[in-house]
Image: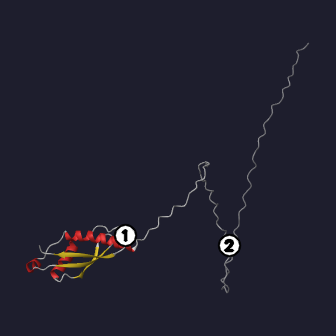
Amino acid sequence: MPDELTIEIVQPKKLESVVVPSPPKPVEEIKPVPIKPLQKKELTTVPKPIETGPEPAHTEPPPPPAVIAAAPKVDTPPVITAPPPEPPKKIEPTEEDISAALGQYGGILGRAIAKHKQYPKIAQMRGWQGDCMLDLKIDSGGNVLSANVKESSGHEALDNQALEMVRKAAPFPTPPEALRGRNFNISVPVSFKLE
């Protein structure tokens, strides 16, 4: 037999499709449009402004609520408070109390004034003697507000010396309770005797 012939069938390879761009279209040339010049016209009316309406209100968002931290509440028994007691009423001194206090205080003043006693030289040389009654106005702290001769000794030198003794002795000790809180007048005798 003659030589055998063998035929092979080969499948053709798959061809990939290739896109070929089409050539660009020619650009049309733009022709300029002729512009007519504006004719000047006189305006006879004023144009109205354009109304845009009310402006929107700018509102800011409300602030976040405040956070209040509190300690846990502990049950406590209620506290009952009584009204404060009334202050004790000040008892006004009676006339007898005031008279007794003036007598007691007059003795204290007489001794305080006597510590500053000096017999005036002219009175010693001439032998003058006498009792002088002074009227003193005293405040509640023992300070002398005024001093006057209520009854004269009969000699101006002795009266002036008595007033000088008061000036040197002041301020006096604090008055008794019955005389405090007010100004008061008190009479104090000053005696001048030669020995």
Q: Is residue 112 above or below residue 49?
A: above
Q: Nearer the viewer, residue 45 or 168?
A: 168
* Res. 142 in view: no
Which circle's residue, 1 or 2, is located before the other in the chain?
A: 2
Query: Where's the N terminus, which quadrant?
Result: top right
Amino acid, disc 2: Pro
Spatial distance from mark 1 to mark 2, Cα to Cα?
84 Å
What residue is rendered at 24% in x and 71% in y?
110
Residue 51: % across, % down: 68, 76
Q: Nearer the viewer, residue 26 or 97?
A: 97
Residue found farthest to the top: 1
Nearer the observer: mark 1 or 2; the answer is 1
Which corner quadrant of the image does residue 180 belong to?
Answer: bottom left
Residue 121: % across, % down: 10, 77
Q: Is residue 125 above or below residue 72?
A: below
Residue 65: % across, % down: 63, 56
Residue 103: % across, % down: 30, 72
Judging from the image, what secondary structure is the residue with disc 2 in?
A: loop
* Res. 109 in view: yes
| Residue 158 relative to residue 134: left or right | left
What residue is rendered at 51% in x and 61% in y?
85
Query: Where's the C terminus, which quadrant?
Result: bottom left
What residue is rendered at 21% in x and 79% in y?
132
The residue wearing badge 2 is 54
Pointer 1 local density, CA inside 10 Å: few below 14, some 14–19, many at least 20: many
Q: Which mark is residue 178?
A: 1
| Residue 84 relative to residue 181: left or right | right
Q: Which mark is residue 164?
A: none
Which corner quadrant of the image does residue 96 belong to?
Answer: bottom left
Pointer 2 local density, CA inside 10 Å: few below 14, some 14–19, many at least 20: few
Amino acid, disc 1: Ala
Judging from the image, what secondary structure is the residue with disc 1 in?
A: helix
